[in-house]
Image (cartoon, rainbow, N blue to C red):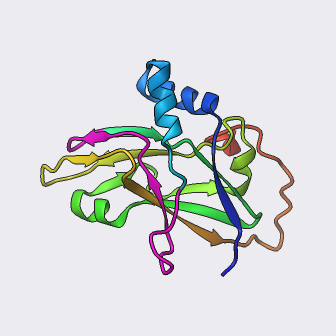
């Protein structure tokens, strides 16, 4: 098995910025407590492909509701690898919990972006059965799988990322 990546927390300052952008101003002690309790993603078993991401705080989604979760996590990985993020299988199956971009793609150079490469998950409860999703702090809600990729023979890109989320198409 290739060892090609390492999860880390972003700085408290960067997490605070992401948290405030999503949920508005909050008591500094509350943000620090949430940050302190952030767990790095990990696999549940030796046969698991996915690294579980754990909710930094409780979130409840009624059918049709959406939330953007700042995970407080970044990932360094070898070039030519990508982290693909999906909802946890059980949440998708039971509640139709969906990532708004279907599959989150975390490029290796995102680690160096101006937001420290903080990974966000924008989730929607797409339930057509009236089910409410209730995810507790520390509960797995998303999984990431590392995948190696290739490029075309005539690819000559030399540009370097200079921003955070969505910056590579600007």
- Name the residue: 71% across, 57% down: 108
The residue lying furthest to the left in this view is 130
Front in this rendered view, residue 163 or 47:
47
- Name the residue: 13% across, 54% down: 129
Image vertical order of residue 145 relative to residue 100, above or below: below
Quarter of the picture holding the N terminus: bottom right
Residue 47 covered by magenta stretch: yes
- Name the residue: 47% across, 55% down: 53
Query: How far from the left and from the top, in percent, is residue 36?
Result: 52, 38
Front in this rendered view, residue 9 or 150:
9
Query: How far from the left and from the top, in percent, is residue 15?
Result: 57, 33
Quarter of the picture holding the C terminus: top right
Image check: 55 left or right of 65?
A: right
Where is residue 63, by image quadrant?
top left
Image vertical order of residue 22 relative to residue 40, above or below: above
The secondary structure that dominates the magenta segment is loop
Image check: 48 left or right of 105?
A: left
Query: How far from the left and from the top, in percent, is residue 112?
Result: 75, 45
Front in this rendered view, residue 78 or 163:
78
Q: Which residues are magenta?
A: 41-65
Q: How many numbered discs?
A: 0
Residue 64 covered by magenta stretch: yes
Query: How far from the left and from the top, in percent, is residue 150?
Result: 73, 73
């Amino acid at each position: 098995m290739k060892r090609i990546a390492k999860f880390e927390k972003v700085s408290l300052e960067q997490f605070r910025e992401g948290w405030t952008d999503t949920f508005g101003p909050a008591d500094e002690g509350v943000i620090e407590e949430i940050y302190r309790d952030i767990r790095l993603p990990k696999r549940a078993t030796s046969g698991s492909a996915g690294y579980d991401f754990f909710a930094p705080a409780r979130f409840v989604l009624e059918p049709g509701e959406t939330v953007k979760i700042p995970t407080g996590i970044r990932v360094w990985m070898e070039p030519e690898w990508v982290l693909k993020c999906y909802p946890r299988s059980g949440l998708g199956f039971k509640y139709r919990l969906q990532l708004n971009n279907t599959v989150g793609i975390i490029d290796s150079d995102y680690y160096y972006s101006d937001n420290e490469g903080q990974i966000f998950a924008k989730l929607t409860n797409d339930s057509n059965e009236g089910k409410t999703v209730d995810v507790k702090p520390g509960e797995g809600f998303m999984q990431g799988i590392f995948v190696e990729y290739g490029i075309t023979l005539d690819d000559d890109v030399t540009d370097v990322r200079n921003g955070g989320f969505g910056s590579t198409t600007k």
